[in-house]
Image (cartoon, grey):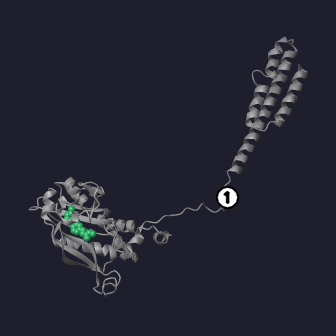
């Protein structure tokens, strides 16, 4: 038995030499130290020995077991540190490699102008609303004092879907919807940006689909001077502190009185140039006092409330601001134009 034990010990240590990974190490442990190992079998057979040899053999058995266990432990530590080193080597990051390149997009000039204008009016306490591009005849025309026989409803001017449904020709219908939703609260201060549609021939200054920003203020005691003050603050914020506004009489069915609003020419600062046709002024907005019929239809009694409204075209402002001469350039998505608006 003593000889058996010695052979077993040598064999076990030799095999352990060849073990290189945790899985085989586990198998080795079951074979040489487990419940069904030869070592365990030998210790069970100890009862057959006589009383004199038994304690000596027992002691020997224990020594061998302890020797194998400590061999196992140091092998396990060696394997674990080798595996750890292999993992660390595999995870090494070369910080000198060039990074992955990502193309960064640019905000389209129309969106940029809309954002700038939104920021200015948010700063003056306005809210921003948006609404459907497919509208009803009622909201697009009727509620804006454009009755059934009005020429603006002509098939020539408007994209109809059915007799009652059409592509909105301005963002005003959303202003009306806002008044109905806000009723009876006051004041209302809202701007509505969005796409609008007209049956126009596309050319350097016209497009059948373009954007508009309209503004609306309704409260008791709103006057034309409030309109002028708000638009002047807006002009200064958008084009600089030197700006002034000039109102000229005009006509819109939904405002009375109505005005065309001019700004100091952004190209020549008022000295006179090709852009302003030597007048020193450029037209930027249409505006006016909300027509009493429009207020009444939306639920705001025109004997108590008054308001002003205005509308402008972000394309025109983008063209003036960035020196774009043909509106179609804003819709062609030519990267040579768009890249100029990327932040580098
Ligand atoms: C222009 C002119 C304008 C309005 C839009 C409006 C809206 C309501 C009531 C009264 Cl709900 N008016 N909008 C008023 C005057 C002018 O736009 O030249 N736009 C590009």
| In the image: residue 33, left or right of residue 92 | right
| In the image: residue 80, left or right of residue 136 | right
Q: In the image as oriented, which residue stretches furthest toward the right?
A: 3
Q: Is residue 273 above or below residue 54?
A: below
Mark 1 neighbour density, 10 Å: few (under 14) some (14–19) many (20 or more) = few
Residue 132 place in picture, x, y as percent: 30, 55
Mark 1 Cβ and ligand 1 under 8 Å apart: no
Which quadrant: the N terminus? Answer: top right
Residue 153 place in picture, x, y as percent: 22, 62
Query: Ligand 1 quadrant?
Result: bottom left
Q: How many marks?
A: 1
Read off the residue under disc 1.
Answer: 94
Residue 221 place in picture, x, y as percent: 13, 66
Q: In the image as oriented, which residue stretches furthest toward the front?
A: 156
Q: Is residue 148 above or below residue 342?
A: above
Q: Is residue 124 above or below residue 276?
A: above
Question: Which of 237/341 is in front?
Answer: 341
Task: Give the residue at x 91% y 22%.
Answer: 3
Residue 133 place in picture, x, y as percent: 31, 57
- Residue 207, quarter of picture: bottom left
- Residue 274, quarter of picture: bottom left
Task: Give the residue at x 76% y 35%.
Answer: 73
- Residue 297, quarter of picture: bottom left
**Mark 1: secondary structure:** loop
Task: Give the residue at x 24% y 75%.
Answer: 261
| In the image: residue 105, left or right of residue 174 | right
């Amino acid at each position: 038995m003593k000889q058996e034990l010695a052979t077993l010990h040598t064999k076990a240590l030799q095999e352990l030499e060849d073990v290189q990974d945790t899985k085989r190490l586990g198998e080795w442990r079951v074979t040489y130290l487990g419940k069904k190992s030869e070592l365990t079998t030998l210790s069970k057979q100890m009862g057959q020995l006589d009383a004199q040899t038994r304690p000596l053999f027992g002691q020997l058995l224990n020594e061998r077991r302890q020797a194998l266990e400590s061999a196992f432990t140091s092998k396990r530590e060696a394997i674990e540190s080798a595996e750890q080193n292999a993992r660390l080597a595999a995870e090494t990051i070369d910080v000198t490699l060039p990074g992955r390149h990502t193309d960064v997009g640019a905000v389209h000039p129309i969106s940029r102008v809309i954002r700038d204008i939104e920021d200015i009016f948010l700063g003056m306490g306005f809210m921003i609303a948006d609404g459907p591009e497919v509208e009803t005849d009622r909201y697009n025309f009727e509620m804006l004092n454009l009755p059934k026989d009005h020429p603006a409803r002509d098939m020539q001017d408007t994209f109809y879907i059915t007799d009652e449904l059409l592509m909105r020709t301005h963002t005003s219908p959303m202003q009306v919807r806002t008044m109905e939703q806000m009723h009876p609260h006051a004041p209302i201060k809202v701007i509505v940006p969005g796409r609008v549609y007209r049956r126009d021939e596309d050319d350097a200054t016209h497009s059948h689909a373009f954007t508009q920003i309209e503004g609306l203020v309704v409260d008791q005691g709103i006057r034309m001077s409030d309109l002028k003050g708000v638009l002047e603050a807006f002009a200064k914020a958008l084009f600089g502190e030197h700006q002034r506004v000039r109102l000229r009489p005009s006509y819109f069915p939904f405002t009375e009185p109505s005005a065309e609003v001019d700004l100091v020419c952004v190209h020549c600062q008022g000295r006179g140039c090709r852009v302003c046709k030597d007048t020193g002024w450029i037209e930027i907005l249409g505006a006016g006092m909300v027509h009493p019929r429009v207020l009444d239809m939306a639920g705001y009694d025109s004997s108590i409330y008054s308001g002003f409204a205005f509308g402008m075209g972000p394309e025109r402002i983008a063209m003036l601001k960035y020196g774009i001469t043909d509106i179609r350039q804003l819709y062609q998505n030519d990267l040579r134009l768009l890249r100029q608006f990327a932040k580098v």
